[in-house]
Image (tube, rainbow, N blue to C red):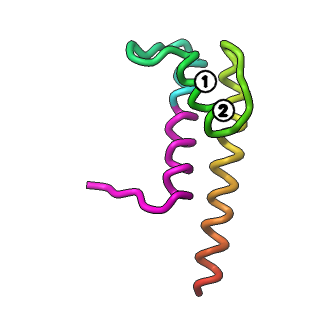
Amino acid sequence: MTTITGPHLSVRFQAATLAAHCKMLAAGMRNSRLSGTAILAKVTQLTGQKYKRGQYKAAIDDLTKIIEAYAIREAYAIRKEQ
């Protein structure tokens, strides 16, 4: 069992999961439980930027920036501990 602790790790995991889902939607794959609009609404909650239907590539770019920012923050924290 995997446990994700800490607020910054959960945000990074959410961003990675949503980015992967947006990549599948951009490729034409559809989910039977969540519509593209629902996924973009969740991305909006995370990024604070609104997306119109079909703007999956813009959402992926914004989520990638969040993932990279948290990775840099995490690497800095590890270096600071050493």
Q: Which residue is mark 2?
A: 60
Q: Position of residue 21 (x, y in %)?
A: 51, 28
Residue 70, compared with residue 78, is above or below; it is above
List the residue tagged with mark 1. 40
Residue 43 in the image: above or below residue 79: above
Magenta stretch, main secondary structure, is helix
Residue mark closest to the camera, 2 vs 1 = 1
In the rendered structure, does residue 4 fall within the stretch colored magenta?
yes
Q: Is residue 77 above or below residue 42?
A: below
Looking at the rendered structure, the kind of residue marked 1 is: Leu
Find residue 52 and report its horizontal and vertical position in percent.
Answer: 71, 16
Which residue shows up at 45% across the image and 18% down it? 34
In the picture, the quarter occupied by the C terminus is bottom right
**23 or 53, which is in the foreground?**
53
Image quadrant of residue 69? bottom right
Does residue 30 show up magenta in the picture? Answer: no
Q: Residues within 10 Å of mark 2 (few under 14, many from 20)?
A: many
For the residue carrying disc 1, how many other residues have a C-alpha within 10 Å: few (<14), some (14-19), or many (20+)?
many
Q: From the top left corner, tell me how far across and down residue 18 is, in percent.
A: 54, 34
Instruction: Left or right? Give the position of 3 relative to 74.
Output: left
* Count of marks overlaid on the render: 2
Q: Please report whichever mark, 2 or 1, sits nearer to the chain's N-terminal start.
A: 1
Chain part drawn in magenta: 1-20
Name the quarter where the N terminus is drawn.
Answer: bottom left
The numbered mark at residue 71 is none
Residue 61 percent across, percent down from the top left = 71, 35
Position of 1 with respect to 9 (left or right) is left
Q: Amino acid at mark 2?
A: Ile
View extreme (left): residue: 1
